[in-house]
Image (cartoon, grey):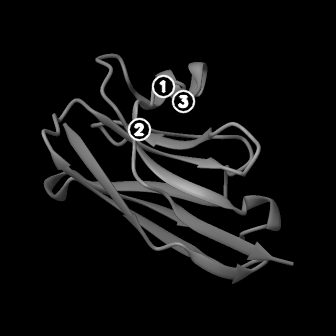
């Protein structure tokens, strides 16, 4: 079983930046992909970014050019650098794990992030205008 713990949420003004971190514990195989999702109350959770073992990345259109996902596989840790934040980025952000054998940055670009199957407890990000 895997356990994911996010840190780094908070409140910022529009145009500001935040960096989220996620640490995974338990049985973490190298083939797993890491990612981030977010959810606004009353709406479905949506994938934001994903990264595979080779460092190939994918992003939701709404965050391209502003968010950057990175990883340190030696520490089972991944990050989400969020720049130029907008009020519409306000949400609870969840780090995610994809255990499927076919996960990859290329797969996410063509199929989206629906295969994220494990999530952390979430961290709040609030962006004011």
Disc 2 is placed on an element classified as loop
* Residue that extends furthest to the right in the rendered view of this protein: 129
Disc 3 is placed on an element classified as loop
| Residue under numbered circle 1 | 106
The quadrant of the image that shows the C terminus is bottom right
Task: Say which mark, if any, is on residue 113.
Answer: 3
In the image, residue 80 lies at what x, y percent? Answer: 48, 60
In the image, residue 105 lies at what x, y percent? Answer: 45, 31
Q: Earlier in the sequence, mark 1 or mark 3?
A: 1
The residue that appears at 48% across and 25% down in the rendered structure is 106
Figure check: 108 above or below 34: above
Q: Name the quadrant containing residue 34.
A: top left
Q: Are marks 1 and 2 in contact (CB under 8 Å)?
A: yes
Q: CA distance from mark 1 to mark 2?
A: 7 Å
Q: Earlier in the sequence, mark 3 or mark 2?
A: 2
Crowding near the residue tagged with mark 2, few <14, some 14–19, many ≥20 C-alpha atoms within 10 Å = some
In the image, residue 113 lies at what x, y percent? Answer: 54, 30
Left/right placement of residue 54 relative to residue 46 reads left
Task: Say which mark, if any, is on residue 56.
Answer: 2
Q: Nearer the viewer, mark 1 or mark 3?
A: 3
Q: Nearer the viewer, mark 3 or mark 2?
A: 3
Q: Are marks 1 and 3 in contact (CB under 8 Å)?
A: no
Q: Name the quadrant containing residue 101.
A: top left
The residue that appears at 75% across and 41% down in the rendered structure is 43
Left/right placement of residue 86 relative to residue 112 reads right
* Residue 37 vs residue 3, the one in the foreground: 3
- Is residue 60 something that shows in the picture? yes
Q: CA distance from mark 3 to mark 2?
A: 14 Å
Disc 1 is placed on an element classified as helix
In the image, residue 50 lies at what x, y percent? Answer: 47, 40
């Amino acid at each position: 079983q895997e356990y994911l713990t996010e840190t780094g949420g908070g409140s910022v003004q529009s145009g500001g930046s935040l960096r989220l971190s996620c640490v995974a514990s338990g049985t973490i195989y190298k083939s797993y992909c890491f990612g981030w999702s977010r959810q606004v109350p009353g709406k479905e959770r949506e994938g934001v970014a994903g990264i595979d073992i080779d460092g190939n990345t994918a992003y939701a259109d709404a965050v391209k050019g502003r968010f950057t996902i990175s990883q340190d596989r030696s520490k089972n840790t991944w990050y989400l650098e969020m720049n130029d934040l907008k009020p519409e980025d306000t949400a609870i952000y969840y780090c995610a794990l994809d255990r499927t054998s076919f996960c990859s940055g290329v797969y996410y670009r063509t199929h989206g992030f629906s295969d994220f199957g494990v999530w952390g407890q979430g961290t709040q990000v609030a962006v004011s205008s």
